[in-house]
Image (tube, rainbow, N blue to C red):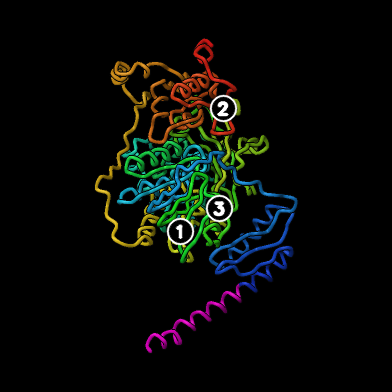
């Protein structure tokens, strides 16, 4: 009787209020769309709003989604089609085998970026069978290897956002994580500069509010103090705000190290593995189909980056859409790395409401200088091409920040794609429809800085969804067994190592002083490097001034010696040779 009365007087009125609110908000949105985007239609899709129609401009489609995001629904599903455009299919591995057939992990993690690998490592603190899958032939192949490597302090996030909270929490965890994983990490600070007193006055209050809200240490620098800190800074900057907790590391080395440590603690990683479908039973994912066999997990973590909305749809939990945001960067030679000490960019009037930080210049952990990125909406999820007009704009905007920078110092370019939702917010939650599904989705910048904190939250949710008694892994060891890095060793330490293994004394990459022994270590590691780019991400041959012109054949020969029958640049489809190599072709004189 009491339950029935509670249903009549509590739950039913709440449900009716919710229905009335949703209906009202939908009608308001429909009127706004009719005025601004007459080709778009809005309807309810569960507790999200779905947009349909056809438009001739991608930026207009994105703007329509952002308008809908302000209406207060759980998420925006943007199904508006771009006229004359057919999205290309997701790139998938050619590999087809039964290596995973019958696998029954406690937790299946979809996605081998920094977030997925952080989750795998954090889950390995518990006695669980953990399987991480990624469709590429290596970890960190998408956004996790295509960013600036900055551990942001959190000042760029809006107050009250999950992005801001995760950023600040994650930032504070990196000293210990990098120590445990033997990953080089420095806190060199970052500065937001201004070039007018009006901007400086506004920024002082605006950024100050964020400092207080998030607990971020920072200080104001007038022109004199700026010159003392950065003698080569452009005279255009008359002041700035400095944030000392900003960190710098190699994002791809970090991701691989997280994956390796997860494996050392009992997790499994299956690369070249794409999820092709799912089957549900009783409100749970019962079966996950892959190109390598059928998996039957107890729980699934969606950390699929730009494909996280597609994974969500496979599981019958579609409530958001990803709109890919692309950015392009330039890399300058190490010769100019000493011209600045931190990351810097000039603030603009649009920064207060922008979803991006605007780019700038920064010294990387490896001594190069990174310039950019720009940011623009883009319908392709896997397009990493660079364009002359974009790079020209990036260089024209940011190179003048430092006296001594010029275009002749550019040695490489790259592009990355961020997985942004229309709400511009992280999705860190258990599914409301599928009990054993957990989302780590919409993780765009500052996803790298936030990854450790995101992993902690996802693990809490996952353990609660698994239920039952789950005991700690008493053998968990956070310290990764890292290979030696000759550049970090003293002369005596190098001599001792070379005596033990002469291959550490054979220099393969002259630009970066990388030895044959280090390259072999990367190929024999827990997450083996099986392509030129994979070796490059771990040990840096090919990242110097000549961009692999000297060392690429030598690295290829070592890969072949280690049993890689078909040497590729970046996995299947990028084969480098029609036949095998011989020692003459891959010698220093060949």
Marked residue nearer the N-terminal end (3 or 2)? 2
Residue 330: where, in percent of width, then height? Answer: 57, 34
Prevailing secondary structure of the magenta residues: helix
Neighbours of disc 3 within 10 Å: few (<14), some (14-19), many (20+): many
**Image spot of residue 325 (x, y percent):** 59, 48
Which of the pair 229/544 is nearer the observer? Answer: 544
| Residue 286 visible in the displayed image | yes
Please give the residue where the numbered disc 3 appears in the rendered image.
420
Q: Is residue 10 magenta?
A: yes
Q: Position of residue 496 (x, y in %)?
A: 28, 18
* Residue 429 against residue 389 in the figure, above or below: below
Question: Which quadrant of the view contains residue 525?
Answer: top left
Pick out the residue farthest to the top. Answer: 589
User: Mark 2 to mark 1: distance in Å?
Assistant: 49 Å
Depth check: give the residue in front, 98 or 258. Answer: 98
Of 326 and 84, the residue lying toward us: 84
Please give the name of the residue rendered at 58% of the width and 39% of the height, measured from the top-left corner. 415
Helix, strand or loop status at disc 3: strand
- Residue 231 visible in the snapshot: no
In this figure, which residue is indicated by the disc labeled 1? 286
Asked if 63 appears above or below 576 in the picture, the reply is: below
Residue bearing mark 2: 411
């Amino acid at each position: 009787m009491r339950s029935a009365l509670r249903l009549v007087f509590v739950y039913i009125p709440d449900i009716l209020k919710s229905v009335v609110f949703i209906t009202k908000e939908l009608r308001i949105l429909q009127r706004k769309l009719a005025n601004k985007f007459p080709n778009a239609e809005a309807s309810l899709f569960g507790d999200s709003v779905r947009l349909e129609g056809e438009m001739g401009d991608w930026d207009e489609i994105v703007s329509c989604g952002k308008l809908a995001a302000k209406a207060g629904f759980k998420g925006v599903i943007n199904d508006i089609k771009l006229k004359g455009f057919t999205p290309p299919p997701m790139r998938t591995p050619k590999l087809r085998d039964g290596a995973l057939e019958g696998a029954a992990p406690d937790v299946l993690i979809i996605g081998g970026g920094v977030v997925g690998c952080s989750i795998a490592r954090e889950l390995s603190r518990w006695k669980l069978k953990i399987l991480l899958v990624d469709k590429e032939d290596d970890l960190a192949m998408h956004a996790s290897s295509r960013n600036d490597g900055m551990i942001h302090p959190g000042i760029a996030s809006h107050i009250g956002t999950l992005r801001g909270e995760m950023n600040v929490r994650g930032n504070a965890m990196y000293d210990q994580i990098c120590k445990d994983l033997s990953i080089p990490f420095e806190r060199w600070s970052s500065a937001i500069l201004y070039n007018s007193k009006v901007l400086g006055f506004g920024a002082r209050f605006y950024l100050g509010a964020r400092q207080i809200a998030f607990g971020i240490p920072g200080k104001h620098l007038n022109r004199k103090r700026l010159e003392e800190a950065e003698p080569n800074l452009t005279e255009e900057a008359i002041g700035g705000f400095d944030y000392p907790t900003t960190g710098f590391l190699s994002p791809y080395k970090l991701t691989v190290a997280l994956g390796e440590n997860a494996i050392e603690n009992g997790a499994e990683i299956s690369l070249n593995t794409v999820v092709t479908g799912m089957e549900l039973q009783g409100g749970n994912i019962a079966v996950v189909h892959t190109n390598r066999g059928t998996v039957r997990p107890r729980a699934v973590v969606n950390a699929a980056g730009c494909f996280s909305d597609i994974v969500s749809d496979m599981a019958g939990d579609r409530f958001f859409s990803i709109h890919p945001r692309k950015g392009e960067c330039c890399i300058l030679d190490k010769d100019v790395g000493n011209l600045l000490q931190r990351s810097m960019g000039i603030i603009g009037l649009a920064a207060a409401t922008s979803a991006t930080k605007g780019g700038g210049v920064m010294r990387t952990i490896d001594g190069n200088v990174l310039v950019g990125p720009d940011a623009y909406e883009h319908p392709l999820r896997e397009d990493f091409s660079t364009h002359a007009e974009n790079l020209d704009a990036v260089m024209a905007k940011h190179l003048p920040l430092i006296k001594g920078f010029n275009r002749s110092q550019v040695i490489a370019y790259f592009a990355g794609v961020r997985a942004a939702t229309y709400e511009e917010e992280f999705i860190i939650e258990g599914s409301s429809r599928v009990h054993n599904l957990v989302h780590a989705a919409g993780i765009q910048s500052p996803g790298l800085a936030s990854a450790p904190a995101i992993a902690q939250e996802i693990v809490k949710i996952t353990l609660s969804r698994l239920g039952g008694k789950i005991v700690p892994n008493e053998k968990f060891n956070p310290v990764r067994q890292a290979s030696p890095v000759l550049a970090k060793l003293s002369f005596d330490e190098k001599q001792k190592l070379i005596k033990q293994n002469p291959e550490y004394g054979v220099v393969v990459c002259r630009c970066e002083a990388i030895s044959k022994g280090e390259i072999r270590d990367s190929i024999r590691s827990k997450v083996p490097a099986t392509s030129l780019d994979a070796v490059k991400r771990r040990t840096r041959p090919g990242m110097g001034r000549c961009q692999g012109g000297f060392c690429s054949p030598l690295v290829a020969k070592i890969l072949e010696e280690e049993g890689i029958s078909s040497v590729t640049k970046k996995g299947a489809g990028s084969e480098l040779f029609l036949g095998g190599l011989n020692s003459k072709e891959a010698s220093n004189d060949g």
